[in-house]
Image (tube, grey):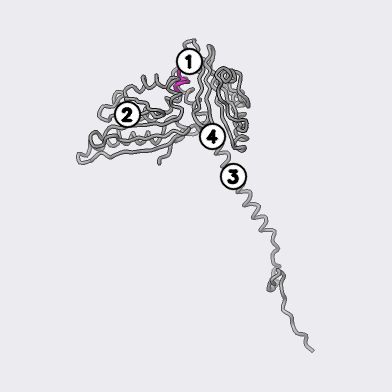
Amino acid sequence: MHNTRGRTPRQKGMMFLEPFNRSLLEACQKKFIEEKKTLEEDSSAQPDPLNVRSMDFDGVHYILKVPDFSSNPSKLELSMTWDCLPQLLKEGGQKLLDDKYSDYSPSVEGTTVTISADGKSLPEGGDADKVCLTLASLKRHLFGAPLTSAFEKLKSGSSGNASWFDYRLDGRLYVKPMSDRVVVSHAIHFEDETDAALVYVFLQEFMDAQKKSHVAAPHCQFHKSPPDEVAGMIKDNNIEMPPASVTTYYLTFAVQPTHIDSSGKLHKCVELLIDVRNYMNYHIKCTKAFLHTRMRNKVDELHKVLKACYPQNVKGQKKGKKKAGGGSAKKKHKRRI
């Protein structure tokens, strides 16, 4: 089992996750770049078989393999299984497969999508690095398809249909396109009381940071109940809600045309919005680990204080033998007559 994804360098104390799967990227580079170079330099070298099984955030499973090693050892096949895949395909995912992954022979079966690339005739103009990154970013592109579609309609001045999908068991994403903005709301469920308390503070910081920001960031709101846009969607479509025993918080962003007026801004905005849940979950786990470390250090200090409270023997005083009851027994001397 490989590590799922790496982290980008620190930026002003914040930690952002990479939008692609690191283990898939490295496996593809090893096959399409390193192995190809080795075979060209050494005529006696042989290609290696490949079978990588990996997992990613949100319950995604990957299988990267050489489907027919005997006849074509340079061809890679990537399969991704995700429970919300059918919903994503309806909300722009299928169009993305037809456009961006048309040269990768995409096929869909249930909740699994499969693409492939042949090292002998690579797509993307033969750019191996670009092909590897495209394969490793399959989840990012499919997850961001509904947002990309809504943002493109916003740029053109039109509004589309509202959409929602459960991208994980404890997370749901609502997208409400309007003529002047797109409302994106994360509904995050927490069954653990400690996590719910930490995330309350964390989400409150989102709102405070947005108020203090000097850049024109998207308007951010934090609710314990569905905001008006989401409440309307729930009522009109009879969307099933989690039980009352589960704590649910709503983090809502209002994206305006100025936030996506260039392709670079649109691309970055999509990446940040789809990774909010994982970004927050990462920092919650780090916070809990930090608190546990502080607690353990405090307990160690208290143990040292308790040990220092034990009575010490006076210097030069002889120790008496201890009795079974805990006292000390001194030697009795016979009185001389």
Q: Which residue is mark 1?
A: 261
Q: Amino acid at mark 4?
A: Asn
First of labels 2, 4 by sequence position? 2
Estimate the x, y position of residue 309 in percent, counting from the top left.
70, 58
The residues tagged by marks 2 and 4 sit, at their Cα atoms, a distance apart of: 32 Å
Determine if the magenta segment contains residue 147: yes
Q: Is residue 215 visible?
A: no
Q: Amino acid at mark 2?
A: Ser
Q: Amino acid at mark 3?
A: His
Residue at the (59%, 27%) spot, across then down:
206
Q: Nearer the viewer, residue 293 or 103?
A: 103
- Label 2, residues with CA under 10 Å away: few <14, some 14-19, many ≥20: many
The residues tagged by marks 3 and 4 sit, at their Cα atoms, a distance apart of: 17 Å
First of labels 1, 3 by sequence position? 1
Main SS category, magenta section: helix
**From which residue to which does the magenta span run?**
144-155
Q: Report helix, strand or loop for mark 2.
A: strand
Q: Nearer the viewer, residue 169 or 297?
A: 169
- Of the two numbered discs 2 and 3 in the rendering, the one whose residue sits closer to the viewer: 2
- State which quadrant residue 333 falls in: bottom right
> Which label number is shown at residue 116?
2
Residue at the (52%, 35%) spot, across then down:
282
Instruction: Specify the quadrant that holds the N terminus.
Output: top left
Q: Which residue is mark 4?
A: 281
Q: Report helix, strand or loop for mark 1.
A: loop
Check contact, mark 1 vs mark 2: CB within 8 A: no
Extreme residue toward the top, this view: 157
Q: Amino acid at mark 1?
A: Asp
First of labels 2, 3 by sequence position? 2
Q: Nearer the viewer, residue 145 or 128?
A: 145
User: Does residue 328 appear left or right of residue 287 in this picture?
Assistant: right
